[in-house]
Image: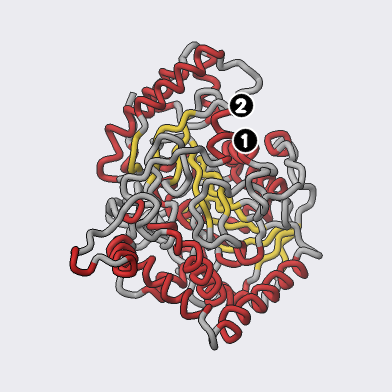
Amino acid sequence: MTASSIQTIADIRTAMAEGLTAVDICAQYLERIAAHDGPIHAFTHVAKEQALERAESIDRRGAEDPDLPLAGVPVAVKDNICTRGLPTTASSRILEGFVAPYDATVIDRLTKAGAVVIGKTNCDEFAMGSTTEHSVSGPTHNPWDLERVPGGSSGGSAAAVAARLSPIAVGSDTGGSIRQPAAFCGIVGLKPTYGRVSRYGLLAFASSLDQIGPFALTVSDAATLLQAIAGQDSCDATSAVEAVPAFDAALREPVPNPTIGVPWQILEDGVDPDVHTAFSAAIDVLRGQGAKIVDVPLPHAGYAVPTYYVVAPAEASSNLARYDGVRYAYRAPVDAAGADLTSMYDRTRDTGFGDEVKRRIMLGTYTLSAGYYDAYYLKAQQVRTLIRRDYDTAFERVDAIAMPTTPTPAFGLGERSDDPLQLYMGDVFTASANLTGLPAISLPCGYGASGLPVGLQLTGRAFDEETLLRLGAGYERDAPWWRDTPPAAAIRG
């Protein structure tokens, strides 16, 4: 197989069966990164030596080992997931120079499955953002248009997969941070059910919302990656005891006579015409495959964004209190005349955190403060319960709920930097899945007039990723948008 034809896990398995080694595969992807990542900036660290050493160990063991379902498959890892021996900075100055002394559970499981960690990917600082512009190392650019954002906060992981710099990647999703960049970059992104994947080793943003999940070009690859990382973990008390289905095997059979709900009323305002057109066409494909499409009311969906932007900053203000300049990484210099502990804390956090992180810490601290807790945080948690009840009611008669992943295609770099409210409203269709803990997948479903990708989001019942993957695989067979290669990924070979 030529370098340009190796893009998916299936391609890698075929190539290795035909004689290529894990080292050959790793070297090809390292070459792609060297040739194409400069203007994209998907990676903050390329683990060349470690990756090649790991690939050599796979070759010594034998890629045909049935215990290695990801044998020789490169994987890119978001820079807020601890990876032993590699920088793990959450793209923040306050963790400048920090090298993780241990592997997150997902990294341990990927390693045991035979995957090769090829590098760490750029993200919004501490996963707080929707553009991957809020990074101490600078923004990531969308492979479809280098003047546009790739989405966030997992924009580096999404861009790496879209540009064919890595066949798969892992990211984290707190309010849409896997699905939104997947939509902007024209690939598959899945947020599993809360608790399906261990969060041990994930640098916490909002602990009741965060979830690690896969990026891939195809639904099948997303299923294979999820299979490898899912399951209960004794290191994470919030990981679930539910058994992990055989996701790969489930894809072989379609969902019989599925019913898909669409909340048409909330799509009436604020949705870009190109997005609405592509979404409607995707619904027609599903209908043509035998799905019954019904209207479902989600009466509290309009409160998802304000609820999220109370709950998430509140939890962030607590989680980020640990970064104080005392135990590790960055510490601001303090003049000898004013060298007291409090001033060191203040200067470290002021110069170590970026503007967006400081904005959210202040919002969260305010909503948790005396006199405001009941009015804001407690009220938000009550509305969160109402949003979950809306979904529970809808799932009494549908198998999945379909919406656009985002209200617009990717917008220009810097276009919304001065308007945080407009930026936050981009989470209108994604935040509910985090507030409710439900699984949701974004699938590429076409393009707008500008040639930018549009995403279709399917949300399912708790711990029913199986149905989402089966529906997604069925849709993908008739709408294989993933085969299109973005301009910034013109691979030759």
Q: In this rendered view, identify the residue nearer to me: 296 or 288.
A: 296
Q: In this rendered view, identify the residue nearer to me: 415 or 477.
A: 415
Q: Quadrant of residue 480?
A: top right
Q: Picture coordinates of residue 153 (x, y %)?
A: 43, 56
Q: Picture coordinates of residue 213 (x, y %)?
A: 56, 47
The answer to whether residue 298 is above or below residue 126 is below
Residue at mark 1: 228
Q: In percent of the image, x 76 and y 42: which residue is there? A: 243
Looking at the picture, the colour scheme in use is secondary structure
**SS class of the residue under badge 2?**
loop
- Marks 2 & 1, CB-CB < 8 Å contact: yes
Q: Picture coordinates of residue 76 (x, y %)?
A: 44, 38
Q: Is residue 90 visible?
A: yes
Count the labels in the image: 2
Going from N to C along the chain, the mark reached first, 2 or 1, is: 2
Q: In percent of the image, x 69 and y 57: which residue is there? A: 460
Q: In this rendered view, identify the residue nearer to me: 446 or 316.
A: 316
- Label annotation for residue 69: 2
The N terminus lies in quadrant: top left
On the rendered structure, is 213 left or right of 232? left
Q: Amino acid at mark 2?
A: Pro
Q: In this rendered view, identify the residue nearer to me: 468 or 451.
A: 468
Q: Amino acid at mark 1?
A: Ala
- Label annotation for residue 453: none
On the rendered structure, is 303 left or right of 37? right
Q: Picture coordinates of residue 95 (x, y %)?
A: 36, 51
The C terminus lies in quadrant: top left
